[in-house]
Image: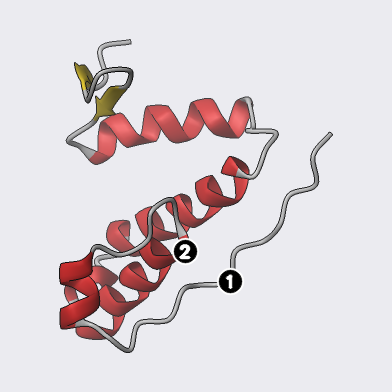
Amino acid sequence: MGSGSVTKHGETTLQYTVKSLKDLDRIISHFDTYPLLSQKGADYKLFKDAISLIRNKEHLTLDGFRKVLSIKASMNLGLSDELKRYFPDIKPSHKRVIDSI
């Protein structure tokens, strides 16, 4: 497929990195076709919401940037300590709960 790269990230993990919206389109297409069947599906939905804000250039405004931060606060590890320090009033976006199959 040729999108992104994989690097070792710690002793037991790998990290997959992409650097363009074109590469992200391939990933989004894949997960739209083959949905995640766990709580990670909720993170994926939030991820798509953030990409939509970026695609529409809303992240270039303070309000849009704050929306992206709100989404980030809801995903995986949330906001870094540094982002929390600079944006202490950011509240996590609503994250839906996915029932396990």
Residue drawn where x is 20% and y is 37% of the image: 20
Quadrant in the rendering for residue 77: bottom left
- Label 2 close to label 1 by CB (< 8 Å): yes
The residue identified by callout 1 is 94
Residue drawn where x is 28% and y is 25% of the image: 16
Residue drawn where x is 55% and y is 31% of the image: 31
Mark 1, secondary structure of its residue: loop
Taking the view exactly as shown, the residue that stands out farthest to the bottom is 89
Taking the view exactly as shown, the residue that stands out farthest to the right is 101
Mark 2, secondary structure of its residue: helix
> Percent x, y for residue 51?
36, 53
Q: Please state which of residues 6 and 55 is positioned toward the viewer in this rendering.
A: 6
Q: Residues within 10 Å of mark 2 (few under 14, many from 20)?
A: some
The residue identified by callout 2 is 74
Residue type, mark 1 in image: His
In which quadrant will I find the C terminus? top right
Distance of label 2 from label 1 (alpha carbons): 7 Å
Relative side of 10 to 25, left or right: left
User: Measured along the vertical axis of the image, is residue 73 above or below residue 66?
Assistant: above
> Percent x, y for residue 92?
46, 74
Residue drawn where x is 39% and y is 66% of the image: 73
Quadrant in the rendering for residue 24: top left
Q: Residues within 10 Å of mark 1 (few under 14, many from 20)?
A: few
Relative side of 22 to 33, left or right: left
Residue type, mark 2 in image: Ser
